[in-house]
Image: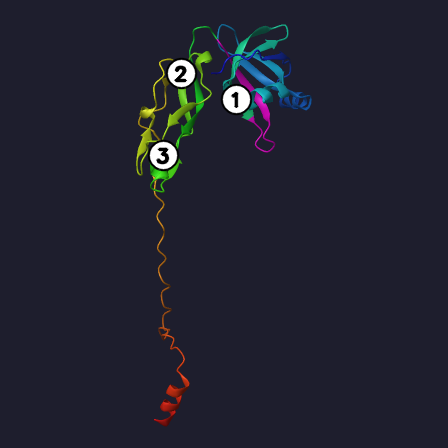
Amino acid sequence: MSENKDITVRAKPREGRGKNDARRARRDGMIPVTVYGGEGGTVSALAPARDLAAILRSDTGRNTIFNLEIEGVESGEVMFHDRQIDPLRLRLIHADFRRLVAGEKIEVTVPLHLEGEPIGVREHQGVLEQIVREIDIRCDPRDIPESIDVDVTNLGVHDVLHVSDITRDERIEILTEADMVIATVGIIKEEVVAPPAPVEGEAPAEPEVIGKGKKEEEEGAEE
């Protein structure tokens, strides 16, 4: 579960709003962030890039609950709601945080993991194909699982696993459509390669004649 691991990120209010201010902040190791939700208004701040990157790299990743302290403004528990990544440097350049409210459920996306080796793979040389790798759920922030694990050991060849087949947890409401296919076991068919077609106007190749023996050659010469 995405429990609070006593992580505290200390930020400061963001004064500038332009792109140049954001660039300067990033050069100084700070990331522009926006905090909203709950009983407070929208707040803009600058948070240490190193701290946010460490949270995203943790086991709970973007679903980690942590304390955000904005100097002279507010303090409270938050989670990542959205983030923007530089496509070239693959670095975080902006983040949105959601304030957490006691007793209020939230919607999040969690990884979907397949467990076990399907019988169709083990006994019939099938291939397991995972179609869906994430699933949307609604629950209390402290009940967010690190992943939804699904047992696929009973899947045979051509069997299909749907979202509706996931074992239910009373604390979690699955929002992804029930009939969506999660995984299936298929068979890879070997492609039959046809012989090359003869070129138009070209005589079919004569069958190769294995060389005659010396005696047969002499008899042929006498005829």
Considering depth in this image, is 69 or 17 the residue closer to the camera? Answer: 69
Q: Which residue is mark 2?
A: 138
Q: Residue at x 40, y 16 (%)?
A: 138
Tell me the element at label 2: strand
Q: Which residue is mark 3?
A: 118
Q: Is residue 201 above or below residue 16?
A: below
Amino acid type at mark 2: Arg
The residue carrying mark 1 is 59
Q: CA distance from mark 1 to mark 2?
A: 19 Å
Q: CA distance from mark 3 to mark 1?
A: 27 Å
> Is residue 161 left or right of 49 when viewed as pictured?
left
Residue lying at the far front in this picture: please name it: 215
Residue at the image point whose x is 35% and y is 48% from the top: 189
- Front residue of 26/107: it is 107
Of the image marks 1 and 2, the number of the one nearer the N terminus? 1
When the figure is inspected, residue 213 is found, relative to residue 66, above or below; the finding is below
Give amino acid for label 3.
Pro
